[in-house]
Amino acid sequence: MEAVNSITPVLAFAVPLLASGVILCLHGRENLRDSVSVVAAVIAFSLVISMAPVVLERGTVEISLFQILPGVDFAFRVDSL
């Protein structure tokens, strides 16, 4: 199976990162902070599960964001390892 180009690996990384920033800003509002944490976890889990069929068929999900140097990319790649 060939590689699938998708933004999903970036989103799976970005959602918890963004949620942690929001959680830090909500230090005085405990219920809202906990809600953001649960919602972010569900979204991140859903994104990871959406990549599972491709990975279970020995494929990869990848995206190259930009090239740092010739032959050196800043990229995200999800495979069976």
Image: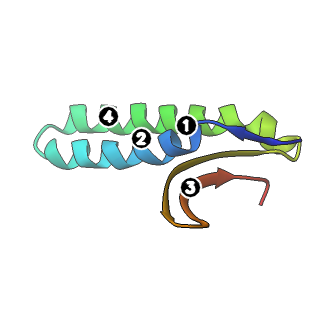
Crowding at dot 3, Cα within 10 Å, few <14 / some 14-19 / many 20+, comes out as few
Reading the chain from its start, which is encountered first: label 1 or label 3?
1
Picture residue at 62% right of the left edge, 36% below the top? 6
In primary-sequence order, the first of circles 1 and 2 is 1
Per the image, label 4 sits on a secondary structure element best described as: helix
Marks 3 and 4 sit apart, C-alpha to C-alpha, by 28 Å
Q: Position of residue 12 (x, y in %)?
A: 52, 42
Q: Secondary structure at mark 3?
A: strand
Q: Earlier in the sequence, mark 4 or mark 2?
A: 2
Per the rendering, the mark at residue 36 is 4
Using the numbered discs, state the Cα–Cα distance from disc 4 to disc 2 in whole angstroms: 11 Å
Q: Which residue is mark 3?
A: 75
Say if mark 1 contacts mark 3, CB within 8 Å. no
Asked where in the image residue 1 lies, by quadrant, the reply is top right
Quarter residue 31 falls in: top left
CB-based contact (under 8 Å), mark 1 and mark 4: no
Q: Quadrant of the C terminus?
A: bottom right
- 33 to 79, vertically: above or below: above
Q: Amino acid at mark 2?
A: Val
Q: Amino acid at mark 4?
A: Val
Is 77 rendered above or below residue 25?
below
Dots 3 and 4: beta carbons under 8 Å? no
The image quarter containing residue 22 is top left
Frontmost of labels 4 and 2 is 2
Name the residue beneath numbered marker 2.
Answer: 15
The amino acid beneath tag 3 is: Ala
Q: Which residue is mark 1?
A: 7
Q: Give the class, few, some or many, for how many residues have Cα within 10 Å of label 1's Cα (few <14, many ≥20).
A: some
* 37 to 81, vertically: above or below: above
> Are the residues at dot 4 and dot 2 in contact (C-beta closer than 8 Å)?
no
